[in-house]
Image (tube, helix red, strand yellow):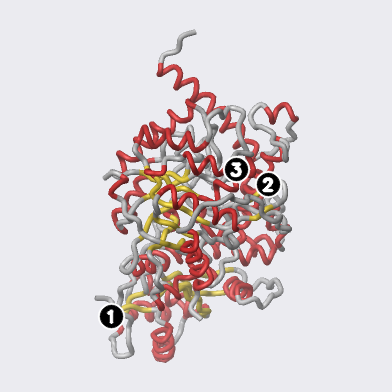
């Protein structure tokens, strides 16, 4: 399979445990759902039971956080076998993960750590994507992560690095528009140049999310509405791609389903119209100690699962 | 010097490995780095120094894993208090960094770790509070495991009219005993009743999963022994005989006990039909 066979699924939401009952009961008019792959690998409890019901009604995509495609550790084939097993069982439309590493020496930091962007890393990751794609027997979709530092050893812009991965492997891209904004602020590059130059034909999916602006840096918290500059970048990306599957992630302070859905549907306002001058400034948020990729992303709240 | 493609890749890989090893060490074991040391790898920006950029990852690493441990060990975090819990957690993570693809495994060594590091480990006379904390940690890990365990939930529950020979325990059914009233304490915590730490008192508890929901039921000592024997032999008759022979309970009285237990446990859904 090549990525040009992958469909535009429309507007989707990240599937979260807080919304299970609402989705099962109301079958809301969402086009598709994205799951965190690791939450359902080796899983035999209620989350997996609910997923099996949801996928009878909605297309589902698998989004991973532990492939560690940029690590110098050997690829973890036990992990990949479980990933493939899950994909065989639930038949996702595609499988994605991040341009990152999560650890070395067999350790998992459970963070999406940045890679140095240079020719050597590019070749290293190209080789690994090819191995993964051969193993999974499908293209891998790679997402740009939110990053909080730049390495001295980086000499390629991230969009160019991603284009290099695409050219060498045929992989797809998951363009996280919020991550572009966050990384651009933190590492002082131009997000508009990024979106204008990334390979639009290979963007299979886009992500939207909220973040926390801490004044001198921004943390990708997924715990609030999407800010206006990110919507404007989304408008630009929508125009450049001609429209592609778009998904809202909301992982901290998760509101009720209808609030998340309403935030997602705002995307429709940005699918048309001319791209004007984009004001990239956003107000500073005074909350303390933001953590990227909040834990709700990856942990099930077992205490809520008892018989009342 | 000319480098062929394979040598270039090896060199690049060595450089990447050096950067990743250095950064991971700084996440797991942060040290006082000089400006020069940090800037060997990380670029400063106009807003933040290289150390400040790195610190964002350092802070997120420990905060994320603490939050995960607090989610998995709600009762223990309450019992120790969040600050002490975080200190134990930091020490634990320092000794047992995650090696799993899933955060679900993060606390799998926690009870063992608490036992190994209890402050009175080498004392002849031991305090009781570490025993409580260790038992609570074991219990909470078991709950997490039972919640997501693979199991066949497509079962037929026993009804009153089924014969004793048709009784079989649910696929996920744990018969537990502790030195402390662990389950009662845990339920009080998750229901936000803010319980006092309990005194030592042997407790007997059933943890089961039915239709993907967990259930906790307190039982007495006799019921514990009856169910343990039933679990081993899958025979009501044999379990009753065991109680008569080992605890000197008159057979007629045991029949009366069973009649009462049978009805209560059918209502609580302890048994599936043994097809």
Is residue B111 something that shows in the picture?
Answer: no
| Label 1–label 2 contact, CB within 8 A | no
A236, A220: nearer the viewer:
A236
Give the foreground label among 1 and 2. 2
* Residue A152, quarter of the rendered image: top right
**Element under disc 3:** helix
Q: CA distance from mark 3 to mark 1?
A: 66 Å
**Element under disc 1:** helix
What x and y, as percent, mark residue A225? 58, 62
What x and y, as percent, mark residue A208? 51, 56
Q: Residue at x 52, y 52 (%)?
A: A275
The answer to whether residue A77 is above or below residue A290 is above
What x and y, as percent, mark residue B104? 50, 56
Q: CA distance from mark 2 to mark 3?
A: 10 Å
Q: Which residue is mark 1?
A: B166
Q: Which mark is residue B183?
A: none
Q: Quadrant of the C terminus of chain B?
A: bottom left
Tell me if mark 1 has few (under 14), some (14-19) or many (20+) residues whose alpha carbon lies within 10 angstroms of its own: some
Is A54 left or right of A258, judged from the image as shown? left
Q: Which residue is mark 2?
A: A217
**Element under disc 2:** loop
Is residue A202 something that shows in the picture?
Answer: yes
Tell me if mark 2 has few (under 14), some (14-19) or many (20+) residues whose alpha carbon lies within 10 angstroms of its own: some
The answer to whether residue A200 is above or below residue A299 is above
Q: Which residue is mark 3?
A: A184
Is B232 left or right of A149, judged from the image as shown? left
Q: Residue at x 39, y 71 (%)?
A: A29
Judging from the image, mark 1 belongs to the subunit labelled B
Q: Residue at x 53, y 71 (%)?
A: A259
Residues tagged by mark 3 and mark 1 found on one chain of the structure: no
Residue extending farthest top: B1
């Amino acid at each position: 399979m090549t990525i040009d066979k992958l469909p535009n699924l429309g507007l989707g939401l990240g599937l979260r445990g807080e919304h299970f009952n609402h989705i099962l009961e109301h079958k809301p008019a969402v086009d598709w759902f994205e799951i965190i792959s690791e939450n359902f690998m080796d899983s035999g409890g209620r989350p997996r039971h609910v997923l099996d019901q949801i996928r009878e009604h909605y297309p589902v995509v698998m989004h991973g956080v532990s492939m560690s495609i940029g690590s110098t550790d050997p690829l973890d084939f036990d992990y990949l076998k479980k990933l493939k097993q899950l994909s065989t069982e639930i038949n996702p439309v595609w499988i994605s993960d991040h341009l990152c590493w999560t650890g070395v020496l067999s350790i998992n930091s459970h963070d999406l750590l940045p890679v140095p962007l240079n020719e050597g890393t590019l070749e290293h990751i190209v080789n690994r994507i090819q191995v993964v794609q051969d193993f999974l027997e499908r293209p891998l979709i790679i997402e740009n992560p939110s990053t909080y530092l730049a390495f001295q050893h980086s000499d390629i812009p991230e969009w160019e690095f991603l284009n290099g991965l695409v050219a060498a492997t045929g992989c797809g891209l998951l363009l996280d528009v919020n991550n572009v904004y966050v990384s651009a602020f933190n590492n002082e590059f131009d997000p508009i140049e990024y979106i204008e130059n990334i390979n639009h034909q290979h963007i299979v999916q886009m992500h939207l999310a909220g973040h926390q602006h801490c004044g001198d840096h921004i943390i990708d918290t997924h715990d609030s509405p999407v800010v206006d500059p990110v919507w404007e970048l989304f408008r630009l990306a929508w125009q450049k791609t001609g429209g592609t599957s778009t998904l809202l992630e909301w992982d901290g302070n998760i509101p009720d389903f209808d609030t998340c859905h309403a935030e997602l549907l705002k995307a429709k306002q940005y699918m048309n119209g001319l791209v004007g001058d984009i004001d990239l400034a956003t107000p500073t948020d005074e909350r303390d100690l933001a953590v990227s990729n909040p834990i709700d992303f990856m942990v099930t709240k077992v205490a809520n699962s008892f018989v009342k | 010097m000319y480098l062929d493609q394979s040598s270039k890749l090896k060199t690049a890989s060595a450089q990447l490995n050096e950067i990743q090893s250095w950064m991971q060490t700084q996440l797991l074991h942060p040290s006082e780095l000089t400006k020069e040391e940090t800037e060997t790898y990380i670029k400063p920006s106009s807003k933040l120094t290289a150390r400040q950029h790195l610190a964002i990852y350092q802070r997120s690493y420990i905060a994320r894993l603490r939050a995960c441990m607090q989610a998995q060990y709600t009762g223990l975090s309450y019992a120790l208090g969040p600050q002490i819990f975080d200190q134990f957690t930091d020490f634990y993570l320092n000794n047992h960094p995650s090696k799993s693809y899933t955060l679900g495994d993060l606390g799998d060594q926690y009870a063992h770790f608490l036992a190994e590091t209890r402050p009175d480990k080498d004392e002849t006379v031991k305090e009781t509070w570490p025993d409580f904390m260790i038992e609570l940690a074991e219990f909470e890990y078991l709950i997490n495991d039972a919640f997501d365990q693979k199991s066949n939930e497509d079962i037929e529950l026993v009804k009153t009219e089924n014969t004793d020979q048709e009784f079989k325990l649910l696929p996920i059914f744990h018969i537990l005993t502790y030195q402390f009233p662990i389950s009662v304490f845990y339920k009080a915590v998750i229901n936000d009743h803010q319980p006092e730490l309990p005194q030592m008192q042997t407790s007997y508890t059933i943890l089961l999963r039915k239709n993907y929901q967990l259930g906790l039921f307190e039982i007495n000592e006799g019921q514990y022994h009856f169910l343990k024997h039933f679990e081993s032999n899958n025979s009501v008759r044999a379990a009753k005989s065991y109680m008569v022979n080992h605890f000197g309970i008159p057979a007629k009285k045991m029949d009366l006990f069973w009649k009462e237990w049978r009805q209560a446990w059918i209502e609580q859904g302890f048994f599936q039909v043994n097809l």
